[in-house]
Image (cartoon, coloured by chain):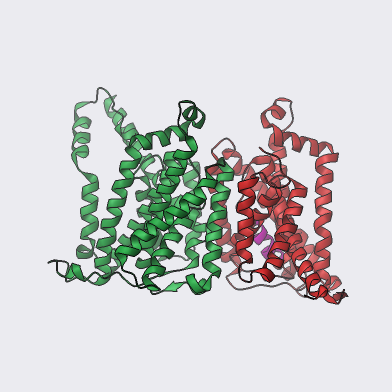
Amino acid sequence: MAPSFLFSQFMGGLTTAMFLFLIASGLSLVFGIMRVINFAHGSFYMLGAYLAWQGVEWVHPTGAGFWIAALFAATGVGVLGAVVERLFFRQLYGREELYQLLFTYALVLILGDVAKFIWGTGQLSVSTPPVLAGSIQVFGTTQPIYNLFMMTIGPAIAFFGWLVLNRTGVGRLIRAAQMDREMLDALGANVGTIYTGMFVFSAFLAGLSGALVTPIQSIVPGMDVLIIVQAFIVVVIGGMGSVWGTFWGSVIYGEVLSFGILIFPGFSLFSVFALMAVILIVRPWGLFGRPL
Amino acid sequence: MTMETAVPERSQDTDAVSRVLRRVPWTFVVLVFACAVPWIGSRYDTFLGEQIAIDALFAVSLNLLLGTTGLVSFGHVAYFGVGAYVCGILMKTYDLPFVVAFPAAGLGTALFALVSGYFCVRLIKLYFAMLTLAFSQIIWAIAYKWNDVTGGDNGLPEVPFPNLDWMNSIPGLDSLKTSEQFYLLAVFLIAVSLAILHRIVRSPFGRVLTTIRDNPERAAFIGVNVRLYQLAAFVVAGTFAGLAGALYGIFSRGVFADYVFWSKSAEVMIMTILGGMDYFWGPPVGALALVWLNQAITDYTEYWPFVLGTILLVLLFVFPGGIVGGLDLLWNRLRRLRRA
């Protein structure tokens, strides 16, 4: 196999990885602190994509308003996250995880239909913002500039997340809430606000990733349930609640998928699910996580 | 279960009512009614009835894990799917008769449940849910991509009906269509399966499962091999889900990869909780309610998932006990009011 071919497979895997990382980081954050698998995270992502399309339509249909639209989408989804957490989710914290899982699934059903009701069932697409359109030649392969942009934004967010969690006062509170909610509450920290903040931030990230994916993927109903499973795999591989774990989890996922196609064509999907199962069996807390 | 707790000193009239209600052999009445559907109802009623019966078995099998053992399986559809594929492949590709394919589906599913369950029961709570989800997605990926065996994207259309010619020699049944004869066979097999599951839940084995649900540490402390019991429950639940799947493949005249997608696991879970997972007959009531609601609502709107999501929200926040739980509560309140 030619090196340039392998390189382009590698870059393809990395692009997938960085998109997934944006989505999965929010999922991992909510799991890490609230111990809840949020199925609705995929719906937040889908709503982000639809809202970005809507924003582009309103601001500048040729695509120049892409950045404003993306910010609008992410903020909109963040606000939705705040409403969901404050009105409903809050009441379920003490309950069994079954109820929490089903609550987030109810959101998947409802939000999926709301999106269908507003935007219909057709495919929608957003054109690449002009600044990042086009492609460049790297090692004899053609790389779209937008993909390269995504590849830089992923690590940037990972680094930023790590910095906030490990080097700031807010991060210390978040880590404390992760370890012992009651104790932190007793010490006088406002745990409720921390939870809301984390949930909103995770929804914001989901909305942002949905918006950023629109230039390279068309927006269709059903993208919510497809993406959430992929995000799960990433989070399970890397370890729930760990930023770098999620980062490396996405890289592993992207590359296994990308090279799996070369080794067993048709079974790359199988190989990522099998990888998830093996990790859960051997190290349930993931490669980079810590046991609960 | 709570329905059976005796209340001392009942007033005379409610006592009489409840005694009469209790004397009625409800399961038998329902069974006779289910068998009569092809004669008293339309073809569409038979279709709905079969859907409800199959879903009821599927949901009761899930409830053996969810309600009885306290294991939140988010991949129960995998076993339904394995059963459907094994039965469908044997009957369509290999032309084997139903009497071979149906038990083979149960056996195949049991084996898969044994292997996957062995790993699943080692994990606790959320990790258990995630690993079951992972296994169900593995089955989905295989079903979706292994074109030579499962038909991949196109699925396995036109799974044949079993040979039911012997029913034609029974007077009264010879006038029925093949699909209606298969309905009767399915109702019979499901009734037997439910009877077995009922027996299992009420057996000492079932009691141990409930002990494990309530307090695994204490169960281990009194000498129960918790994982072994959980694994046994997992295999039994998987097997009956597989049998339900086998019937479903024939009933819907084909097996498709969509049947195994993870969101189907959530649907059967909703069914179970809607009925009430603290009661053996809760999940069948949930299946009845959901199938009936689905067909009533899709006449008016295409937004069935929205309605389902809303039902689920109401259920979670207002009636966590489900329909049977709600009725039970209401019944007890009425009785207390009368007594006062």
Q: Residue at x 62, y 48 (%)?
A: A280
Position of residue A13 in the picture relative to residue A228 (left or right):
right
Position of residue A220 in the picture relative to residue A198 (left or right):
left
> How many numbered markers are drawn?
0
Q: Which chain is red?
A: A
| Membership of A126 in magenta stretch | no
Q: Quadrant of residue B249?
A: bottom left
Q: Quadrant of residue A220?
A: bottom right
The boundaries of the magenta stretch are A43-52
Position of residue A19 in the picture relative to residue B108 (left or right):
right
Q: Nearer the viewer, residue B289 or B194?
A: B194
Q: Is residue B21 above or below residue A201?
A: above
Q: Nearer the viewer, residue B153 or B317?
A: B153
Q: Residue at x 64, y 56 (%)?
A: A275
Is residue B266 in sight in this rendering?
yes
Q: Nearer the viewer, residue B190 or A118?
A: B190
Is residue A43 in sight in this rendering?
no
Colour of chain B, in one word, is: green
Farthest residue in the left direction? B171
Residue B113 place in picture, x, y as percent: 46, 51
Q: Is residue A47 above or below residue A143?
A: above
Residue B141 place in picture, x, y as percent: 56, 64
Q: Residue at x 32, y 56 (%)?
A: B53
Q: Main secondary structure of the magenta part?
A: helix
Screen quadrant of the N terminus of chain B: top left
| Membership of A51 in magenta stretch | yes
Q: Residue at x 69, y 42 (%)?
A: A32
